[in-house]
Amino acid sequence: MMMTAVANVTDNRLQMSMKPVLADMVLGNSEADKLVESIRGRIPVYTLNANAARGDVANLYRSVGRMNMRLSRIETRLEIIDEPAE
């Protein structure tokens, strides 16, 4: 399952969360939004102040990168399991 960063800018804050792209492809936007809302506690949300230091931004990118690497590993395992046995 692929994830994408969803960014919202409110009151001089940048808020990013990871949203499942697969949900959008399978369910459509409104259904996917309901799904994301139902699992909101399990989707990390990152909030940065407008005056965030470079280190804060770098940490955010590292966190997102680590999450993408974990998801890639899970996808690889699922592909191996989904292959038919010979």
Image (tube, rainbow, N blue to C red):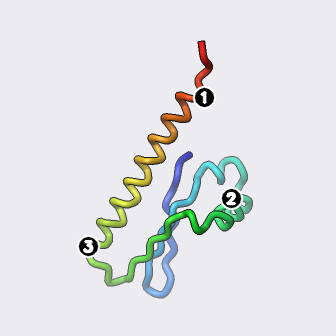
Q: Which residue is mark 3?
A: 54
Side (left or right) of 45 relative to 39: left
Which quadrant would the C terminus be assigned to in this image? top right
Q: Nearer the viewer, mark 3 or mark 1?
A: 1
Few, some or many residues within 10 Å of mark 3 (<14, 14–19, 20+): few
Which numbered disc flags the more N-terminal residue, 1 or 2?
Answer: 2
Local packing at callout 2 (Cα closer than 10 Å; few below 14, some 14-19, many 20+) is: some
Mark 1 lies on residue: 82
In this view, the mark in front (1 or 2): 1
Is 40 on the left or on the right of 10, as rendered? right
Which residue is denoted by mark 2 in the rendering? 32
Judge by depth and name the residue closer to the eye, 35 or 84.
Answer: 84
Q: Helix or strand or loop: what does disc 2 sit on?
A: helix
The residue shown at (45%, 71%) is 46
Locate the N terminus by quadrant.
top right
Q: Earlier in the sequence, mark 2 or mark 3?
A: 2
Between 35 and 41, the residue placed more toward the observer is: 41
**Residue 70 higher or lower than 57, as above or below:** above
Horizontal and vertical percent for residue 11?
48, 87
Marks 3 and 1 in Cβ contact (< 8 Å) = no
Residue 42's quadrant in the figure?
A: bottom right
Q: Amino acid at mark 1?
A: Asp
Q: Earlier in the sequence, mark 3 or mark 1?
A: 3
Q: Residue at x 26, y 71 (%)?
A: 55
Residue 12: percent from left, percent from top: 43, 85
Distance (Cα) linking label 1 and label 2:
24 Å
